[in-house]
Image (tube, helix red, strand yellow):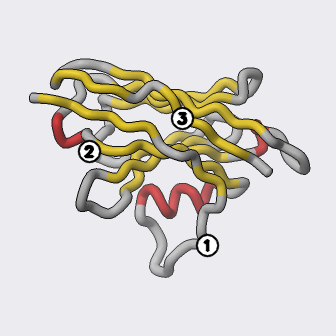
Amino acid sequence: QVQLAETGGGEVQAGGSLTLSCTASGFTRHNFDDYAVGWFRQAPGKEREGVSCMSWSGATTYYVDSVKGRFTISKDNVKKTLYLQMNDLKPEDTAMYYCAADLNLSILADHIMGWGSTPPPPINIWGQGTQVTVSS
């Protein structure tokens, strides 16, 4: 069973930077580089929202408008690790950040970007989350 573990969260002042990591393990039928990967976040009292996702090859990336130009998603298939470089952090970026994986980029992107007229199939591979707090 694939497992994801996030690290790198913390508290930072507005304008600062953090890099989140998400390390994957437990692969059986598929390898890490078979998966599209992405990041979600959930602020207190709010619904979970998508942040960014990337195709298995890394050739395709998507970002929601609120983080575009400030956040960068990347992955290292050898280390089986997904990253989220976050620059120019704002108090509104404060949230629990979760990584997720799916063999189908379209499904992951639909969840993150809100595309499609019908709800996409659920994502079944999630990390436990890492807290990011941005103070003003």
Q: Residues within 10 Å of mark 1 (few under 14, many from 20)?
A: few
Q: Residue at x 41, y 64 (%)?
A: 114
Identify which residue, 19 or 57, lies in the foreground: 19
Marking on residue 66: 2
Three-letter residue code for mark 3: Glu
SS label for mark 3: strand
Q: Mark 2 or mark 3, which is nearer the start of the sequence?
A: 3
Where residue 29 appears, x then y in whole percent? 90, 50
Vertical arrangement, residue 103 with respect to residue 88, above or below: below
Identify which residue, 110 or 136, lies in the foreground: 136
Q: Residue furthest left?
A: 136
Residue 63 can be seen in this image = no
Q: Mark 3 or mark 1, which is nearer the start of the sequence?
A: 3
Marking on residue 6: 3
Three-letter residue code for mark 2: Ser
Three-letter residue code for mark 1: Pro
